[in-house]
Image (cartoon, coloured by chain):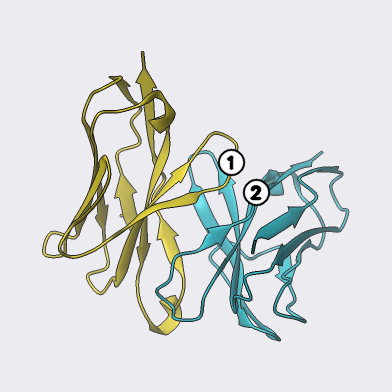
Chain colours: A cyan, B yellow
């Protein structure tokens, strides 16, 4: 069955370190998204991609970057982790019509000390 | 004003009760609407899409009022397993919003015996 996976599921790191969170989907979806979820803020969009070599900034992109070298993967990199980036991170994907629902991965819980 | 607003609750109801959640959205050009369900420490999952004519899926009924920019979800005969956070989700349409979803903060439902 097609699916979307994230790794690691839990991560503890120190401030200033570079961290990369992986997202892999086998739906063959062109659209992929990264969100963070914090109490009081709901889900907020960090970066998104409409296809290979395409990346775009979301509403909370500062301190994060993504790259899209193939259809299946959209890794999220925290360039220099900060305590404010402690959060739960969700990856999602959707088809190309623009109005389709999104399917979410299981999430990565990141703690920055 | 938030783009998608929900009453955060929490709603505490007994098994068998009927409960309704409301949601308002700010963009009149919004094109598609969804209710997602999120269990504690899990990823959001699509509960149902919301269509202009209203739609039903078993015990769940969704309504859309475009004139008032209002979406609702009705749950009949509540079960313990319905306890979760319910997210109102809107796709604002094309242009810079293409493919992107905007999430409400969620309404917490607890169903007790």
Q: Residue furthest front?
A: A1
Question: Can you identify the residue that label 1 sits on?
Answer: B42
- Residue at 40% across, 24% down: B80
Are the residues at dot 1 and dot 2 in contact (C-beta closer than 8 Å)?
A: yes
Q: Is residue B33 left or right of residue A65?
A: left
In the rendering, at what x and y percent does residue B99 appear? Answer: 46, 75
Up the image or down, B34 lies above or below B21; here it is below
In the rendering, at what x and y percent does residue B27 appear? Answer: 27, 68
Q: Residue furthest left?
A: B67
Q: Is residue B18 left or right of residue B11?
A: left
Question: What is the quadrant of the N terminus of chain B in the image?
Answer: bottom left
How many neighbours does mark 2 have within 10 angstroms: few (below 14), some (14-19), or many (20 or more)? many
Tell me the element at label 1.
Answer: loop
Up the image or down, A74 lies above or below B82; here it is below
Q: Residue furthest top?
A: B113
In the rendering, at what x and y percent does residue A10 appear? Answer: 78, 42
- Residue at 65% across, 60% down: A3
Question: What is the quadrant of the C terminus of chain B in the image?
Answer: top left
Up the image or down, B105 lies above or below A31; here it is above
> How many angstroms separate mark 1 from mark 2 (CA)?
6 Å
Viewer-closest of A113 and B35: B35
- Residue at 62% across, 69% down: A47
Question: Can you identify the residue that label 2 sits on?
Answer: A106
Name which quarter of the figure residue A30 lies in: bottom right
Tell me the element at label 2.
Answer: loop
- The chain that hosts pointer 2 is A
Up the image or down, B14 lies above or below A18; here it is above
């Amino acid at each position: 069955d097609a699916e979307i996976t994230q790794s690691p599921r839990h991560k503890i790191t120190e401030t200033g370190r570079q961290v990369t969170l992986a997202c892999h989907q086998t739906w063959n979806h062109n659209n992929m998204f990264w969100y963070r979820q914090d109490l009081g803020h709901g889900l907020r969009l960090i970066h998104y991609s409409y296809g290979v070599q395409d990346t775009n900034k979301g509403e909370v992109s500062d301190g994060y970057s993504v790259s899209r070298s193939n259809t299946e993967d959209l890794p999220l990199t925290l360039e220099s982790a900060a305590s404010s980036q402690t959060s739960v991170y969700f990856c999602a994907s959707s088809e190309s019509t623009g109005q389709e629902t999104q399917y979410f991965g299981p999430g990565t819980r990141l703690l920055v000390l | 004003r938030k783009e998608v607003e929900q009453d955060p609750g929490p709603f505490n109801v007994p098994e068998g009760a009927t409960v309704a959640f409301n949601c308002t959205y700010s963009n009149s050009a919004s094109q598609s609407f969804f209710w997602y369900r999120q269990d504690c420490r899990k990823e959001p999952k699509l509960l149902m899409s919301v269509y202009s004519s209203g739609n039903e899926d078993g015990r769940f009924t969704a309504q859309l009022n475009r004139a008032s920019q209002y979406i609702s979800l009705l749950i009949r005969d509540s079960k313990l397993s319905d306890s979760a956070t319910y997210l109102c989700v809107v796709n604002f349409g094309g242009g810079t919003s293409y493919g992107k979803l905007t999430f409400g903060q969620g309404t917490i439902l607890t169903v007790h015996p």
